[in-house]
Amino acid sequence: MASSKAHHATGWAAGIIAAAVVMHPPAAASADMVSGVLALLAGVAGATAPDWLEVAWWTRARRLWITHRTLTHWGIGWAALLALSYHFLGRHPAAPVAFGFACGGIMHLLADWPNPLGVPWIVGRHSLRLWTSGHCDLIIVMAAWAAALFVIDDVWFHHAYGRMLLNALHF
Ligand SMILES: [Zn+2]
């Protein structure tokens, strides 16, 4: 896995993305600060969830109760939760939490993807085979934050900053 530090660092980015989406109309006409904060926190929790969900943390031995990187790292499951919770945004009070959690989970899978063990997106593990665990965490974290900034710029500033950057690059 990517290191847990990397999962935390990308988790905040995932949470911010989730909060931005949750608070962005028209996804939720009733969107408020509270659901944004809930989505943010759920995103942070979700980003580490695929790893702690597979540990029997309620027992003393803390053994894995399912094989590492199987069901809890299943791409379809997280994508389904994401789609479902998005659908219920503004209609069900728990939707922002579920949506944030799913954003975090997807972010976790993306962070695990490049290392050799891979991630079971659909069936069977797939790996980008770019590097081994813990290496290049910085790249993952930076990519996550770039995505977060892009989403924030998109939903809150309508690409105002993106355009400014492009203009600056073109002189
Ligand atoms: Zn993992």
Image (cartoon, rainbow, N blue to C red):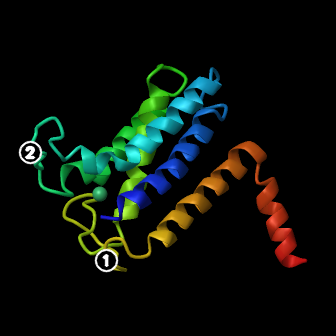
Looking at the picture, does residue 136 appear above or below residue 21?
Answer: below
Count residues near mark 2 (Cα–Cα under 10 Å), then give few for <14, some for 14-19, many for 20+. Answer: few
Image quarter of the C terminus? bottom right
In the rendered view, does 144 fall on the left or right side of 125?
A: right
| Mark sitting on residue 25 | none
Residue drawn at x 54%, y 41% as measured from the top left: 18
Q: Secondary structure at mark 2?
A: loop
Q: Residue under label 2, please give it.
A: 61
For marks 1 and 2, give the one nearer the viewer.
2
Q: Quadrant of residue 124?
A: bottom left
Amino acid, disc 1: Thr
In the rendered view, does 62 fall on the left or right side of 142?
A: left
Quadrant containing ligand 1: bottom left
Q: Secondary structure at mark 1?
A: loop
Mark closer to the chain start, 1 or 2: 2
Q: Spot the residue most to the bottom.
A: 130
Question: How far is mark 1 from mark 2, CA to CA?
Answer: 27 Å
**Location of residue 80 in the rendering, given as x and y in whole percent from the top left corner:** 35, 42
| Mark sitting on residue 132 | 1
Residue drawn at x 48%, y 19% as measured from the top left: 93
